[in-house]
Amino acid sequence: MSSQQQLGLVAPPLGLGEVDHVRSLSDNLNALLLSDNYQDITLIVENHRIPAHKIILASRSEYFRALLFGGLLESQKSEIELKGISAAAFHVLLKYVYTGYVSLSSMKEELVKDLLGLAHQYAFPELEQSVSDYLKSILSQTNMCLVYDVANLYQLRVLMEACRQYADKHATDILQSEAFLQLSPGTLCDLLQRDSFCVAEIEIFRAVLRWWHHNSYDDCVVKEDTTNELNSVLKSVRLPLITLSELLNEVRPSHLVSSDVILDALKFRTESRDSDLPYRGQLMPEVNVAHSRLGAQVLQGEMRTALLDGETTNYDMERGFTRHPIEDGNAGIVVRLGQPSIINHIKVLLWDRDMRSYSYFIEVSMDQRDWVRVVDYSNYHCRSWQRVYFPQRVVRFIRIVGTHNTVNKVFHVVSLEAYYSPVVVRLEKELIVPKHNVATIQLSACVVEGVSRSRNALLNGDTKNYDWDSGYTCHQLGSGAIVVQLAQPYVVSSMRLLLWDCDDRRYSFYVEVSTNNRDWITVCDRSRQPCQSWQSISFVPQPVVYVRIVGTQNTANDVFHCVHFECPAQEDGNGFEELVGSTPQLPVDAPLSNPSPLVVADATTPPVPPPLPDHFSNFNPRPLDRERRNLEEEEEINLPIRFTVGSLTSQRSPRQ
């Protein structure tokens, strides 16, 4: 029983139990500011004498606490002059000190700028943050340059970044505005040095020329400091991106750039690869720029309409993908982005309605002639969703070329997306070094060999709900194995698996890894060790696509049972973790396999592939067994293992 009930008290209506007279306190302190009572300090600003109260100033600001009570010379004075600040802005600041209230929307932008400077100078972080947020919300073509200068002066990084992003979206208008002429040299350099300030380089030079003429102090006598400012700004102009005609007819006659510098720019452009030129491009973090709504187009490939429409669920053997024949010299599938864009992440959905695997590489270009290979998975088996990363660069064209299909000679792509991801991803020789578990259904990993009541029970992250009859994957000792295929190659150095442990039995096993399902490397050999429950495995970092777990002993029966597998090992938890660097987030629309009542590895029945192009002269539909024999005769093609529905007697429970 509560104390109120014991005393027979009735609970008050909602709101009457709290006293809130903050507004009254604010009004009283404001009245104190406006009166002559109890004032013990006079602040002089631009010859204005402003009376105040030391204790209130010190309680609101560390700066004034140190100034008035820190033992400095000013602590003994009754009058203190504050130099180099605006009296109007200081009056606003003082009202904020006493009342905690400022109406920014009713103030002129120049006064807001001065108030921001005072908040920074006199250590009012909450006011500084509020003013910064307000300025971010009202950025326009007329005030962006002013706000950018202030943010740069006080190194307000969040506000600076907001100004940069605004300038990126309105680059042409900013260059042509009158406010651009007022930018300080430091802010102008910060603006122009960025790859994402995307506009024709000659337009940037023309704007810099206008800025110089507006800010030069004397057309006849150029001071040394202004010359240094000009040189620092001119270094931000990328002369190799300006055409020969523009260099000779506009840049050279301006006399801002020496002939030697112009010749150096021409030499660099002539002798360099196009991919080495310092291009500018639009920056749209976590936005898929390879989408038709942003002007992206498929230039090469068959059945082009499907690739960029964003549809990643409704596809089958007849529709919903773009393809090209796998043959020497084939140009692959080429996508042109709507605008030159800064990207560092590409997502590709390979056709995955069966267990086939593909190999491929991805190249990017600005002119569709000089191609740079950013990802090369030609020697790896890949399936379903591919999430690849590379150092950021400006890109206009993307080319993906299939080099291998384990079923036929056609490369099928359902979707292609291109992003700039701000997340840092560790790479080693173009391969991701993951921090979190990549052997998950959400990341398109799958079990390609083994026996289970649910196809991917081994990878679903459930390490609690298993018993004698379900929740594990197994194989007969001396026959077969449990094989997991990751969606793409990763550089890993650890794994962890959970052996079935509902009793005190012991297992022995070994683990092998491969990148092509042919060549295997043993990374763990516990075939002579009795093992139980969780098993952590560490080894030298290496590329991994396939993981084969082979049981060699069970002290209870002749079946090896495994409940959970993860790679790399997640010692701090077993649940699904987001892949480091995935952008924007792992796709919830990635196709997942429907669980069967019981699935068994079976290599005898090949999957039915999507149809080959009609114009293939050597294409002749034939029975699946003939197609399988024909494919197996080709040395470079490996038929993938496929899960098919089996009988309940095919699975051996731990008690058997």
Image (cartoon, grey):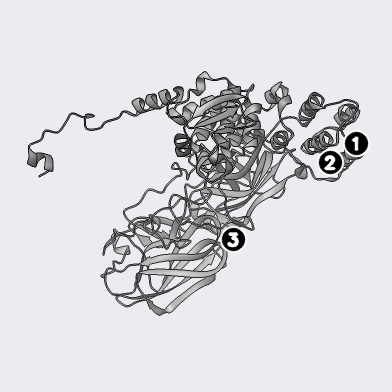
Which residue has dot 1 on it?
A: 258
Residue 202 in percent (x, y) is at 79, 29
Q: Position of residue 136 (x, y in %)?
A: 55, 29
Mark 3, mark 1: which one is toward the viewer? 1
Callout 3 touching callout 1 (CB < 8 Å): no
Element type where label 3 sits in the image: helix
* Left or right: where 436 falls relative to 200: left
The kind of residue tagged 3 is Glu
Amino acid type at image mark 1: Ser
Q: Where's residue 413, x and y in %?
A: 56, 43
Q: Is residue 288 visible?
A: no
Quarter of the image where the N terminus is located: top left
* SS assignment at label 2: helix
Q: Amino acid at mark 2?
A: Arg
Q: Are marks 2 and 3 in contact (CB under 8 Å)?
A: no
Report how far apart the C-alphas of labels 3 and 1 lie in the structure.
Answer: 67 Å
Q: Quadrant of the C terminus?
A: bottom left
Residue at the spot of label 3: 633
- Above or below residue 170? Residue 276 is below
For the residues marked 2 and 1, what is the alpha-carbon distance in whole angstroms? Answer: 17 Å
Q: Quadrant of residue 30?
A: top left
- Residue 396 higher or lower than 105, as above or below: below
Categorize mark 3 by other alpha carbons within 10 Å: few (<14), some (14-19), many (20+).
Answer: few
Task: Write down the residue under mark 2.
Answer: 269
